[in-house]
């Protein structure tokens, strides 16, 4: 049964000057990428994500952590953007201004065609020197697990933000500005467990923006300028676009 689209949300989208979107792992789930909470299978099944995605874990088990990210990178490279990613690319053509913020580290929004994506937690498609922070988009996987930095020899690490690490300052500032300036905020496919990203929807809502949460762990609810919509992003977003701009169908 398809979730009905609240007419108030269609109106808010059609009249919005600035739409800000925050995505989480749920948006990539339909591309076959396990969500963060179920990303741990096999070798890593007995660890919690908060234990593996930390500088301490990398310090203690560099090879295990490097291989966890290499496996996830392989998943991502084999994956394709799904209709949810593509609907967000199309949306950017219809709204005067769109800010796309993602917690995902899979790079699928950019591969789908979205531009200027604010990657709050970095990307597994890039690595960086664990000593001086130099980033690389190519590296010699045969040189070691993890490979040494070609410049200084220190271990390379995924260019992601681990628990206990600060987010890239520029990205967080841009994300907060986009939350405060928008008149419609869409939170899509995120359980909202991880700070400081989880505070962005509330920041927008408290400034008077319309807030819509599109997720599988919410029940449908409309309350003033808050919409909770239980739906799969890959199914719902194309329908929302077509309902708002019939020519987009
Ligand atoms: C920091 C990269 C300063 C690595 C990730 C309060 C304030 C500030 C910080 C904290 C705080 N309390 C605790 C902290 C520390 C911590 C934190 O938030 N911990 C949590 C566990 C409580 N935060 C930090 O450490 C951050 N740094 O704040 O620095 C500081 C430091 C220490 C102490 C104080 C301050 C850094 C956080 C970044 C961590 N790195 N990723 C990697 O990926 O390997 S986080 C990682 O997990 C993801 O990037 C993502 O952000 C998060 C997973 O969340 P989701 O994307 O929401 O995914 P999830 O699986 O949870 O949910 C998916 C949802 O989709 C579900 O609801 C599901 O129902 C839905 N869904 C599924 N399928 C679909 C769908 N929805 C729609 N359609 C579908 N088809």
Image (spheres, grey):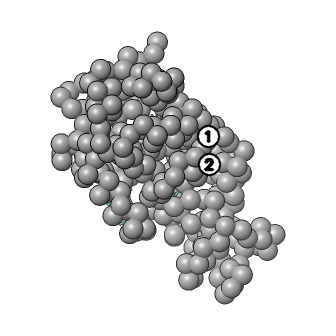
Mark 1: secondary structure? loop
Of the two numbered discs 2 and 1 on the same chain, state the one appearing first in sequence.
1
Q: Quadrant of residue 226?
A: top left
Q: Where in the figure is residue 16, as x and y percent of width and height? A: 29, 38
Q: Residue at x 41, y 32 (%)?
A: 215
Is 187 or 145 nearer to us in this picture?
187
141 with respect to 21 (left or right): right
Q: Position of residue 98 (x, y in %)?
A: 39, 46
Q: Which residue is mark 1?
A: 81
Please state if 102 lies on the left or on the right of 8 as rendered: right
In the image: residue 36, left or right of residue 126: left
Mark 2 in CB contact with mark 1 (< 8 angstroms)? yes
The answer to whether mark 2 is within 8 Å of ligand 1 is no
Residue 18 in the image: above or below residue 124: above
Q: Secondary structure at mark 2?
A: helix
Query: What is the quadrant of residue 213 in the picture?
Result: top left
Nearest the eye: 183 or 40:
183
**Residue 30 higher or lower than 42, as above or below:** above
Give residue 174's quadrant in the image. bottom left
- C-alpha span from label 2 to label 1: 7 Å
In the picture, the disc for residue 231 is: none
Q: Which residue is mark 2?
A: 111
């Amino acid at each position: 049964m398809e979730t009905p689209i609240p007419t108030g949300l269609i109106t808010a989208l059609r009249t919005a000057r600035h739409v800000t979107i925050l995505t989480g792992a749920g948006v990539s789930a339909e591309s076959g990428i396990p969500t963060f909470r179920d990303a741990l299978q096999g070798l890593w099944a007995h660890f919690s994500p908060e234990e593996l995605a930390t500088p301490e874990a990398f310090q203690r088990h560099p090879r295990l952590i490097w291989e966890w990210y290499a496996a996830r990178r392989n998943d991502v490279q084999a994956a394709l953007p799904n209709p949810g990613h593509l609907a967000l690319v199309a949306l950017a053509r219809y709204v005067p201004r769109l800010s796309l913020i993602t917690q995902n580290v899979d790079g699928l929004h950019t591969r789908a065609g979205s531009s200027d994506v604010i990657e709050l937690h970095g990307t597994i498609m890039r690595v960086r020197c664990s000593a001086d922070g130099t980033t690389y988009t190519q590296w010699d996987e045969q040189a070691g697990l993890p490979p040494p930095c070609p410049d200084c020899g220190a271990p390379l690490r995924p260019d992601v933000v681990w628990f206990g690490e600060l987010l890239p300052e520029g990205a967080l500032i841009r994300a907060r500005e986009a939350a405060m300036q928008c008149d419609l905020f869409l939170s899509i496919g995120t359980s909202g467990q991880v700070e400081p990203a989880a505070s962005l929807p509330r920041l927008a809502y408290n400034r008077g923006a319309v807030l819509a949460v599109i997720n599988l762990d919410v029940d449908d609810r409309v309350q003033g300028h808050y919409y909770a919509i239980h739906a799969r992003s890959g199914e719902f977003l194309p329908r929302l676009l077509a309902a708002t701009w019939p020519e987009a169908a």
